[in-house]
Image (spheres, rainbow, N blue to C red):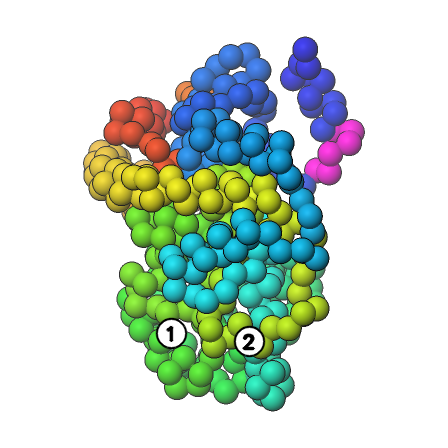
Amino acid sequence: MTTMTDVKTLESQHVLQNYRRFPVVFERGEGMRLFDDAGKSYLDFLSGIGVASLGHAHPGLAKALADQAATLLHTSNLFFHPLQGELAARLSALTGLERAFFCNSGTEAMEAALKFARRFWHTQGATDRTKFVAFSHSFHGRSMGSLSVTWDEHYRAPFAPLIPGVTFVDTNDAHAVSSAVDEQTAAIVVEPIQGEGGVRPISPELAGAINAAIKRTGALLIADEVQSGSGRTGTFLHSPALGLQPDLVTLGKALGAGVPVGATMISARVAPAVVPGDHGTTYGGNLLACRAALTFLDALDGGVQQHVKQISTYLFTKLNELAAAHPARVQEIRGAGLIAGIDLKDDATAVVSAALERGLIVNRTSNTVVRLLPAYIVTEKEIDEAVTILDRVLQ
């Protein structure tokens, strides 16, 4: 049996040191729980950073993946497969956007969206429309393009110079959108709820300013729904709740329920500009990923989406009670559906570590925020258990 010492040795010698890992090795999962190599149970309120949307070892997903693996895994994008068509059609119906480009992650979906936005204007002959407008606290990925529209200088500085022509607007200054967006802006890039940036929903005022700038200049709108989309907020996308109608939407994380899959959804206005050879991927749209996403969508339609709407009210009720019980520690509760942030008045590192010791998995983002991204199957009893642990930790 591999010991913790063996694991640490293997990691320190052979795995690139680009992650700060907790000293736990998980061996199996079931529903909302993970079990480490010593058999200890952990209540998972992070779900692999929003990925394991149906929980761990979901029987329907496991059966679908086993069936697909025994049938056909991959043919390459030189050939069409009906599973791609079925998934694209269902995502189109859910998002209202005409076409789907499949990839392997949210970062890849954003990289594609940025390229497609520029391709659109190039096709129109507006070759000077190359700029992007993004927002403070934004996070869109770590590839060179997605990093260029990511706000935090901590992520950006070591890789400069990045893509030029990106302007960042303070999310609290809706009036600044008008001066930032002009006739050379290719697209505005926004997260309806900023995930890595501290679970910060954008304001109705900011959404209104975005819409006004689009109407005035014709700039495209890219909605990054990698974390807020795929049903996590109670509806498939969160953009419509803010009155936003994006031209491109990026999806990932929860969509594959644990299997790597991303998608860029493209409007009927933008899609015709993309031609063969403009963009591509070897693994994107592979049949295992498509089958996983279809299984996830079936579960949403089968009652899981309705459950998210209902259980969300209970989650935020309990979190607000927690905040009221600890006014000296908790500054604000933010989020929607099953994405929640507990904004503390000091750094969240100690709270996250103490929760892990007590068997609860959450994480820290934006320094002071404890982020919760539970699977869509979470129950009231499990919420009570998680909040009880957090209550003890905050004491």
Residue at image coords 53%, 21%:
28
Specify the farthest residue to the right: 13
Q: Position of residue 339 (x, y in %)?
A: 36, 45
Amino acid marked by disc 2: Pro
Q: Quadrant of the N terminus?
A: top right
- Choose between 152 and 257: the one closer to the eye: 257
Q: Secondary structure at mark 2?
A: helix
Q: Is residue 176 above or below residue 222?
A: below
Q: Quadrant of residue 154?
A: bottom right
- Label 1 Cα crowd, 10 Å radius (few <14 / some 14-19 / many 20+): many
Residue 13 located within the stretch drawn in magenta: yes
Question: Which segment did they paint magenta?
Answer: 12-17
Among numbered discs 1 and 2, the one appearing first in the sequence = 1
- Mark 1 vs mark 2: give the one in front: 2
- Choose between 198 and 393: the one closer to the eye: 198
Q: Is residue 22 above or below residue 82?
A: above
Q: Secondary structure at mark 1?
A: helix
Residue at image coords 41%, 26%:
31
Q: Give the labeled residue for mark 2.
A: 272
Q: What number of labels is visible?
A: 2
Residue at image coords 73%, 38%:
16
| Disc marking residue 126 | none
Q: Is residue 148 above or below residue 306?
A: below
Q: Position of residue 21 (x, y in %)?
A: 60, 32
| Disc marking residue 210 | 1
Q: Position of residue 260 (x, y in %)?
A: 57, 43
Q: CA distance from mark 1 to mark 2?
A: 24 Å
Q: Is residue 251 left or right of residue 276?
A: left
Q: Position of residue 122 (x, y in %)?
A: 62, 82
Residue at image coords 45%, 23%:
30
